[in-house]
Amino acid sequence: MTVQPPMPKLWYKESKPHKFCPGCGHPLLLKALAYAIEELGIEERTIFGCDIGCSLLAWDFFNLDTVQTHHGRTTPVMVGIKRARPELICIAYMGDGGGYAIGSQHLVNAAVRNENIMVVLANNTVYAMTGGQMAPTTLPNQKTETTPYGRDAEKTGNPTLGPEMVAAITPDSAYVARGTVAKLGQLKSFFKKGLQRQLEGKGFSFIEVLSGCPTNWRTNAEETWKFIENEMTRYFKVGELKVPGQKKED
């Protein structure tokens, strides 16, 4: 018999069950983040900022000081808090729209400046809260509400490779990775490494997480996991893209 680990102490019991759709990847992602925060013992110092979109449903998820921002502005808000209170641990949480569309300039600027915060971005390939329209991360030929015949890359461009972009523009001290809700142990380790960089004052960390959206994908449980583990990972490679002190391969 499999023994389930205890639930994170950071959970707000009053807000459970959560408000996310059945099968959504956000709760899994947030659970891994909660374990990382607890294992590092930084609950009293952590500020959690969440964006508009499905990510806003995380505003009462943790027993942490939390701020909800305007759409796309979570990164600069957390940068401002960090500059005003450097001793705090600041986490900016958003979806692909908040990070790669309306908030893309803020992500780029924070990355280039090597701001000492951690940005976590959930990638579910659609604009989920507003009905499942095409997003910056929608896969080629993927059907959405605004691409009913499949995304045409020749007309709309290719999906955004956020971690690859951030890795290319950040200093060597930054930490960049892409995880998945299909591998929670690995995802927790990525979160801990990103938070550790901030604890050490070493600069920016960015972690994209491949997540599921069965409501807008119109998939059952089996189809959802196949899409995350097979289809998404063909385009979005899971792993660490920039690790401080690790030499680049020739």
Image (tube, helix red, strand yellow):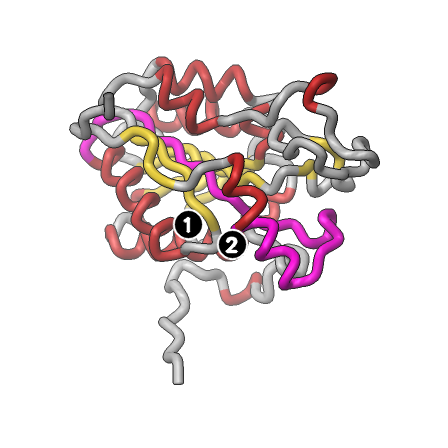
219 within the magenta span = yes
Amino acid bearing label 1: Leu
What is the C-alpha distance between the residues marked 2 and 1?
Answer: 9 Å
Residue at 54% in and 27% down: 99
Q: Is residue 135 left or right of residue 16?
A: right
Q: How many marks?
A: 2
- Measured as percent of width and height from the top left, residue 26 is found at 55, 51
As drawn, which residue projects farthest toward the front? 250
Image position of 42 with respect to 157: above or below:
below
Image position of 236 with respect to 59: above or below:
above
Residue at 52% in and 15% down: 105
Q: Is residue 8 left or right of residue 246?
A: right
Q: Is residue 193 visible?
A: yes
Q: Which residue is mark 2?
A: 61
- Report the span colored magenta: 200-229
- Measured as percent of width and height from the top left, residue 139 is found at 64, 34
74 within the magenta span = no
Determine the secondary structure under disc 2: loop
Image position of 174 with respect to 218: above or below:
above
Q: Which residue is mark 1?
A: 64
- Measured as percent of width and height from the top left, residue 226 is found at 59, 55
Amino acid bearing label 2: Phe
Q: Is residue 81 left or right of residue 230?
A: left
Residue at 24% in and 39% down: 196
Quadrant into which the N terminus falls: bottom left
- Measured as percent of width and height from the top left, residue 174 is found at 28, 25
